[in-house]
Amino acid sequence: MKVLIIGAGGMLARPVVQELDKQGYQLRLFSRNVNQSMFLKDYEIVNGDVFNTDDLNKAIKGCDAIHINLSLDDEATAVQNIVKIALQEKITLISTISGSSVSKKNRWFPMIDNKFRAEQAIIQSGIPYLIFRASWFFESLDLLVRDGKATMIGKQNNPYHWIAAKDYARMVSTAYKMPDTRNKIFYVLGQESFLMKDLLKKYCEIQYPEIKKVNTISTRMLKFIAVLSKNKELKKAAEMFGYFEKTKEIGDTQETYSLLGKPETSLNDWVYSKN
């Protein structure tokens, strides 16, 4: 099977590339910014834009399956474009990463509505699919540590089952090998739940012992700073963390663990592996 990885330059795509490669799949990587220096070996690479039909045609042609790793404001439109060409090229499997709180009831938040519509485009295509609704990743902790300071955004009083990207990647590669996993939504959650502030504190104790305190900035203040600085990315971050202040994790891991195995990486294991 030849698998096209769309969004191959992303943080969560690279471990999937490595796991599928271990299992002997042929791989083609597609993204605007992906390059060979990101990987330990050479892969077939196509640079392009998911909103460009010619680029997508070139990337999808000759592949058997597609794994989508996108996080875009108009992700649903991108996925609709992918599905249209996938049908023409007789793709036999589409997989994608989504979020653990994606559901009809949470579509009031634009990011979740986008993810939900992207999922529906895949489900309604008739192509066999795998949807991985993932929780927060340990890798996200690095985004909260800057210039020798650890900063929480918002109160974040809802616990989440944090997971390592390599455990998620292993689940993806396992699902690819098993025909009875087709047309399922898998909740990719760690075995233990943590409040974000508690986990960030634990992370700093291990990785940055010189950081003695976790600061907190309110989402309202962050939005104010974003408006003053005209920083669109900061504004998006404030809105996203504001959403998670209000939203609890959903999903049952029973089927995921039964078919794909349980996550194995603890916070300590993850920190050790990255150093």
Image: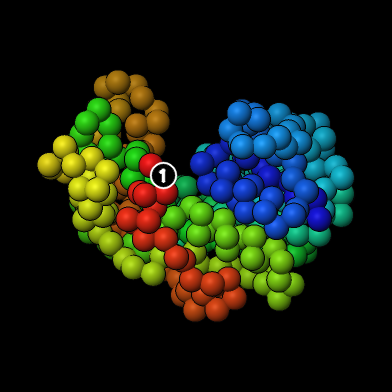
Compare residues 232 and 146 and report the one nearer the observer: 146
For the N terminus, the quadrant is bottom right
Where residue 216 sits, quadrant-wise, is: top left
Where residue 198 sits, quadrant-wise, is: bottom left
**Residue 144, position in %: x, y?**
29, 40
**Residue 73, position in %: x, y?**
52, 39
Q: Is residue 225 visible?
A: yes
Left-right relation of 182 to 213: right
Question: Up-down: is 72 above or below 156?
Answer: above
Q: Is residue 156 visible?
A: no
Provide the secondary structure element on which disc 1 rests. Answer: helix
Instruction: Check disc 1 and report the residue beneath it.
Output: 274
Q: Count numbered badges in the picture.
A: 1
User: What residue appears at the point 63 percent right and 70 percent down from the top-left corner?
Assistant: 184
For the C terminus, the quadrant is top left
Compare residues 19 and 146 and report the one nearer the observer: 19
Compare residues 49 and 259 and report the one nearer the observer: 259
Question: Up-down: is 35 above or below 208?
Answer: above
Left-right relation of 41 to 38: right
Question: Up-down: is 187 above or below 1?
Answer: below
Left-right relation of 211 to 175: left
**Residue 236, position in %: x, y?**
39, 37
**Residue 261, position in %: x, y?**
54, 72
Where residue 223 sits, quadrant-wise, is: top left
Which color scheme did the rendering employ for the protein?
A: rainbow
Residue count near mark 1 (Cα–Cα under 10 Å), binned few <14, some 14–19, many ≥20: few
Give, as a three-letter code, the residue at label 1: Lys
Left-right relation of 155 to 54: left
User: What residue appears at the point 48 percent right and 71 percent down from the top-left corner?
Assistant: 262
User: What residue appears at the point 20 percent right and 48 percent down from the top-left corner?
Assistant: 205
Question: Up-down: is 55 above or below 16?
Answer: above
